[in-house]
Image (cartoon, helix red, strand yellow):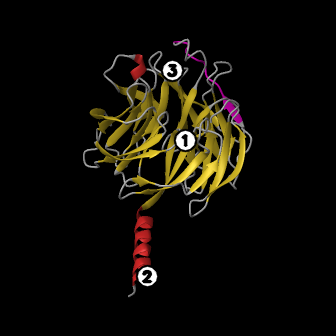
Amino acid sequence: MNRTWTHLLTASLMSLTITAHADTLLVGSYTDGQSQGIYRYAFDSKTGQIGPTPQQVVKSVSPSWLVLSADQRQLFAVNETPNGHVSSFSVSAKGVIKPLNRVSSGGDEPTHASLSRDQRYLFVANYAVAPDPGGSLVVIPVAKDGKLKDRVQQLRHQPSGVNPERQAGAHVHSLVLSPDGQHVYACDLGADKVFIYRYDGASADHPLSPAIPASVDLPPGSGPRHLLFDAKGRHAYLTLEMSGEVVMFDVKDAALLERQRLPLTDQQDAAAKASGGLHLSADGRFLYVSNRGTANEIVVFSVGKDDGQLAFLQRRSVEGDHPREFALDPSDNFLLVANQKSNQIVVMRRDPRNGKLGETVQTFTQDAPSDLKFIK
């Protein structure tokens, strides 16, 4: 075999190896600086390497939170700006993203969204920095072709007012469905409550109605942010942004029954308390929680097999500033952190046996990353 054919064969084999190990990583971002919107990268699940260059850049205004449909052929993004919007995209079998349409979110600074289990409605959390009229929960229908329709329902909550600077208005920060899809949980930082709604997909005008109980109270001034259920829906975990804590609940008939509340930092300074996202490992044995502020850490807990209770394992620096979100890759061998204010995605090795985070395998430059989602 001559040298040219040997070179071509070697290159082809290398390409096949990379393809076999590649997952698709989507990055949402803030576009106040250099970022243009949504970035699509290849992620090598063997080496933990992103890129090096984007496979696609989709122009969109501050798509800070991304939502994939169950079949991963549709993508939705909140456009986190005053007079916010929500955008819809199609995703081809090869991962190519194509814009479909955009509608108003009905409020300011939408920060989060989730899709009903039947894929008929998108639930959008308008955070709204200004206290008047404050944040809201909005229900937006999704057409069969993936396009978004005008909102059909909008719900508002009463703020607690405990912190006059941050809780003078309602601030809906996330909307999470129960694993069975029958309830929606609205975490309202401004109200110090998680509101619980029953979902009825057959009701075209009012898909959501208050559940019994209608809410769960959190400590005054704690600021609930993100909620996460385990796979069976028996336990739930919640970050309290303003107090820098994580709460563990038992779930019974849709009610959240608090069992634990643990600090994310030993520091007493309020600037070190800014809890953010949280994710469970695929096997449900470990919980990872981000704490921003001056702490800038990922905090690792083991999860009790039967009771779901948490035990502290590790604090790991994110080696950057403001870990807005993070994600475990599909292999569960790496954890990727979107450090919004230091413009980087940090990839850490993870030990699936003990759950601990190890060496940093890559620090990838990305302007103002805010969310990370994998297409599997």
In the image shown, does 57 or 122 lie closer to the viewer? 57
The crowd level at tag 3 (other Cα within 10 Å; few <14, some 14-19, many 20+) is many
**Residue carrying label 2:** 4
Q: Quadrant of residue 44?
A: bottom left
Question: How far apart, in angstroms, are the residues tagged by discs 2 and 1?
Answer: 61 Å
Question: How many marks on residues?
Answer: 3
Task: State which region is magenta.
Answer: 153-162
User: 38 above or below 319?
Assistant: below
| Residue furthest to the bottom | 1
Residue 182 circle label: 1
Residue 232 x, y percent position in the rendering:
41, 45
Q: Residue at x 36, y 51 (%)?
A: 332
Q: Is residue 345 left or right of residue 149?
A: left
Closer to us: mark 2 or mark 1? 2
Residue 192 circle label: 3
Q: Residue at x 38, y 53 (%)?
A: 48
The crowd level at tag 1 (other Cα within 10 Å; few <14, some 14-19, many 20+) is some
Q: Dot 1: what SS?
A: loop
Q: Residue at x 49, y 29 (%)?
A: 225
| Residue furthest to the right | 150
